[in-house]
Image (tube, rainbow, N blue to C red):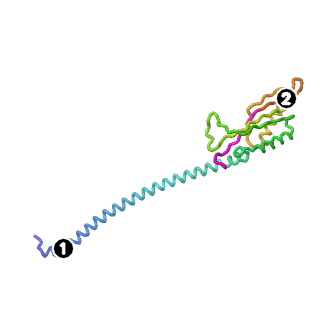
Amino acid sequence: MKPSRSDWTLMQGSVITLSLALIASVLLIYFSEQYAARAMKTWHRAQQQLRSAQANLNEIQQQRDNIASYLRPYQQAQQAHLIGVEPRLDWLESLAKLQQQNLVTRFSYSIEPQKTITPQPAIDTGNFEVHVSDMKLQIELLHEVQLLNFFDALRRQAPGWYQLDSCTISRANPTGAGLKADCKGSWLTLQNRSAP
């Protein structure tokens, strides 16, 4: 059976509605897919930002933990005058107090000007410069134990870090019962390159 012209006229509204519905469905599917693709890209970007933020947070927490673990030893090194400005005046006062304690018969000393050194072999000193002030000591003793006691007292009472390099002990005079020691060492300080 062949539709007549009047049938087409009756069906025309339905065909147009169906066509519009098909076009609208195709457009809706197309734009939905486009929206879903953009949403997926946005989600992936958000996931990358989240991973990056998590990595940054982990790094900051690690740095905070490192600072917490190193802060106390760093502060102790500062209080002991190993880190910071050379405490030369404090050294001189400590040596004067040692003279008053009569740990040895007599001693004299000389401290050379501070100089910057480069450790050999090279080591990573971070943001610190290593400074050294060489010191020579001439000590008169009754016996060797006095020398050990003297350096123990120096280590405990004087701020900073004194490194003993060498000591030469000899008789003060061939017939007498005294000793003399010529010692060399150095005071070490670390100075932060960023400090004012």
At 36% from the left and 62% from the top, the residue drawn is 35
Classify mark 1: residues with Cα within 10 Å, few (<14), some (14-19) or many (20+).
few
Q: Secondary structure at mark 2?
A: strand
Q: In this rendering, is residue 34 above or below 15?
A: above
Judged left or right of residue 25, residue 85 is: right
Give the main secondary structure of the magenta stretch. strand
Classify mark 2: residues with Cα within 10 Å, few (<14), some (14-19) or many (20+).
some
Residue type indicated by callout 1? Gln
Q: Which residue is mark 2?
A: 179
Residue placed furthest toward the top: 174
Residue placed furthest toward the front: 113
Which residues are the magenta region? 184-196
C-alpha distance separating marks 2 and 1: 128 Å
Q: Secondary structure at mark 1?
A: helix
Judged left or right of residue 77, residue 177 is: right
Q: Which residue is mark 1?
A: 12
- Horizontal and vertical percent for residue 145? 82, 32
